Each structure stands twice: as structure tokens, then as C-alpha cells.
Image (cartoon, rainbow, N blue to C red):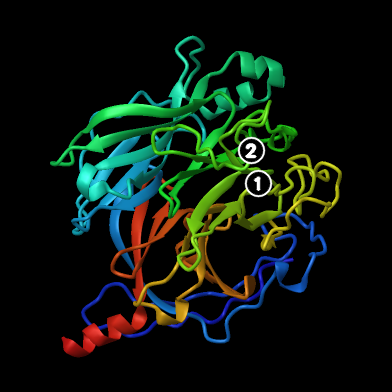
Amino acid sequence: MHLRPPFLVFLAFAAGSALLPVLAQSAHPEPGASFGDDYAPRPAFPEQTRAKGPQTPSAVKTEVIAGNLDHPWSLAFLPDGSFLITERAGHLRIVSTAGEVSEPIDGLPPIKAAGTKGLHDVVLDPAFAQNRRIYFSYFAPNDANPTPDTEAALEAWLKLPVATREAHKIGFETIGRAELSSDGKRLEHFQIILQAPAMGARRLVFGRDGKLLVAADTPGAGDLPTDNEPQKLNNLYGKVLRINSNGTVPRDNPFYGRKGVRGEIYAYGFRDPEGAALDPATGDLWTTENGPRGGDELNHVRAGRNYGFPTISYGLDYQGRLLGTGKLKAKGMEQPVYFWTPSMATSGLTFYDGALFPEWRGDLFLGALAAKRLIRLHLVGGKVITEEHLLMDRGKRVRDVRQGPDGALYVLTDEKPGELLRLVPAAATREIARQE
């Protein structure tokens, strides 16, 4: 089977502009699509998967702010309007509003870039204007067990027996913080605030209470069998963590003080939460879950809850077998708000509450790597009612999406060369054309 025919693409006239606005395509992947599988499990409730497209597709204009980036992973907005961007290979750069890309910022710690590992997320301290502090997640090399910085070396290590792998780490997932110099050229006063042999730090989000929330994945690569680490509370694999800004454990964490349990754990039972964002209306954390084969999820994360992986899942393992017990639900385990089959390889996540797209207020946006698109979800009462697909015409892996201070959406493509894109309403293009 193939993708449903997309809505007709409409190119609106924009005088004086080389970038024409394009109506978003609302195609939905069907089982058997080129990037997925034919597994289509029954949802727990009608709105849990395959929502319909919008009656009127969104009309957006896409601008390229900067290109020639090396697998950009995350971005943060600096007070002067410029962008702080991480590159997976281990570079931190500033991109100006005019699209000028800086040289790599000095002062980063050693970073091991192998396969999908390297430099990942970056966030500003809530008091950045006063302290110029940033936080970032990265893979630190283990000098006692050096291996080539290649995807093949990483996968070979991941396929070792768990005990062997844990005893011979090739690197350490790490969260560090530092101060960005006033000229933006170097990091100062670097500190490691969390380094764990048993986690993979994906996304960082500051909660309203000033605590740092960390979305951590579980090992996985190629045909590696899925293990049960996300269900164990004595490690940080497949967890959402909650720590103080200095790395210590808050005393009000749900498992604080329990014997044999890591106090950093806020919620558990995740596979690969590649996106994380706060609901601006409630302050609650939401995450996107990546794969493995189908079963990509959108989750509303609450303290102390178990999100089921791998005991329950709407996906298959890399060998095409049912995961865990093969069940789709179990007592004491949370259901995803929404899931995708086949797999979209969901990534970055943001809520939209800006003024530039009033019709989008309250909607969720997430990237898709394998499916190469940006996805808009319209929610009503906490359930997905409409699903719209954008940027399909560009054919790029979307790694991150953020709402900017100006109300535009900013997107990073996971490519080499990768791009920083800006999405604005197509109506803005027509207004510019009239003024010219």
C-alpha cells in the first residue's frame, strides 16, 4: 500500500520573494508505507491513533535562516534574537538573525560522537539574563576503553551481553552546565552535574519550579533485542529524571529515599523519548517516544507513573516480534495519548501558544526523522482530534522544533548539511507583496 494522496499543493503568488508559501500536506502513512511496517494494533480508544487531517490545510511560508550545519540537534533562543545550536559531532555555535554561523564555541568538554551519540540538547537557565548559564547533554568518552568514533563500533558494543557492556563502557551520558561568555565565543566555569553509566540523555526541560527534567533513553541499535531496563528502578535507562540545577536530587521526587531506587526518577517505562516540552497552560511535561518499529508515542508525563515499555507497547522489536508480553495495556501502566504505526521516528516537541498563528494556539508540533516531516496535532480535552503533516515537500529529517519569541516556528533538519528553518503564515508573504 502507499501513502494516501496528499492534498493538492497550492503555490500562492509572492512578489519579490523566492520562497513561495505552500499549503501543508495532510497525508497519513498507512501500513506498508516505505518507512514503516504493516503492524496496526487496535487502539485503546478511538482518538489514540490515525486522526483525520484538517478540513483546511495550513498555509505556511518556509524560510531558510541558515544551512551547512552538521547534523544540528537542538536550539535555544538567546536574548539578542540569535540562536544557540548544538551539532551532534560536538560543536556549539551561534547563528545570527541574518543567518551567519559562528565558529565553534570554545570550552566544551571532550565529546564522543559515534552513531547517534554526541552533543544533544541545550537549554538556557531560567535566569540566563543574569547568570548566562546553559545546560547541555552529551556523550563523554571513556579513556579506559577507547573505541573508534563510528556507528559500527557503537553497534558492536551495544550488542555485547548487558553485563559485559556495562563493565566496559565506551562512554558516559553526561549533563553539564557552563556560562556563555559575554562575547559568545567560549564557555566558562564548566561543571558536570550528572554522569550516569546507565542512561542516554535526550532532552532537557526546566519545569516551572526550576527543577531540570531529563528525558533518558534505553540502549538500542539495529537488531539489538530490547531488554527490561526501563522497568527497573535501580538505573536511569528509559526514565524521565528530575534534578536540581546543581545535579542534586529534590526531596519531593516520587521515589526519593526508597531503598534500591534511584532518587532522580520522576517517571519510568520509556524507550527513547526524543522530544519533551511543557504545556504552557498547565506546566505539565509531555514527551514523544521513538519506536522501535511502530508504536511511536505521545505521552502526558506525571510523577511516579509507569509508561509501560517494554511490557506493553504498540510497536514491534527490531526483529519484528511482539515486545515484552505482547500486550497493549496492563494494570498500573499508562496509555499513550496517541501513537503511530508505522513508525515516524518522532523527535523534537513543542507546544504552540504564539500570536503569529492564532489558529494553532494550544497545538503540539513534533518532528519526524524517518518520515521526514513536521507534524501538527490539534488537541481537544487532552485527545488528538486532527493530525496535519507539514514540510513533506522538503524531504528532510526533522530533528527539533521550537516556538520562537516572535511567534514563528523554528525547525532543525538532521542532515549534513542541515538547516535552520523558520515557518511563518503564508498570509504574511501576501501582505509583504502588497506593500511592495
Q: Where, quadrant-wise, is the N terminus in this rendering?
A: bottom right
Residue that carries the numbered disc 2 in the rendered image = 255
* Residue 397 visible (yes or no): yes
Helix, strand, or loop for circle 2?
Answer: loop
Q: Where, quadrant-wise, is the C terminus in this rendering?
A: bottom left
Q: Amino acid at mark 1?
A: Gly
* Residue 295 location (% of width, % of height): 71, 54
Q: Residue at x 40, y 54 (%)?
A: 412
Quick check: 13 above or below 141? below
Tell me which numbered mark, 2 or 1, is placed earlier along the sequence.
Answer: 2
Residue that carries the numbered disc 1 in the rendered image = 304
- For the residues labelled 2 and 1, say whether their Cβ atoms are less than 8 Å apart: yes
Quick check: 178 above or below 9? above
Helix, strand, or loop for circle 1?
Answer: loop
Quadrant hosting residue 86: top left
* Residue 265 location (% of width, % of height): 60, 38
Quick check: 314 above or below 86? below
* Residue 87 location (% of width, % of height): 37, 40
Quadrant hosting residue 29: bottom right
* Residue 394 location (% of width, % of height): 45, 63
Give the spatial CA distance, label 2 vs label 1.
7 Å
Q: Amino acid at mark 2?
A: Phe
Decide which of 402, 5 is in the foreground and name it. 402
Neighbourhood count class around disc 2 (C-alpha, 10 Å): few under 14, some 14–19, many 20 upward: some
- From the viewer's perspective, is 242 left or right of 92? right
Q: Residue at x 43, y 51 (%)?
A: 209
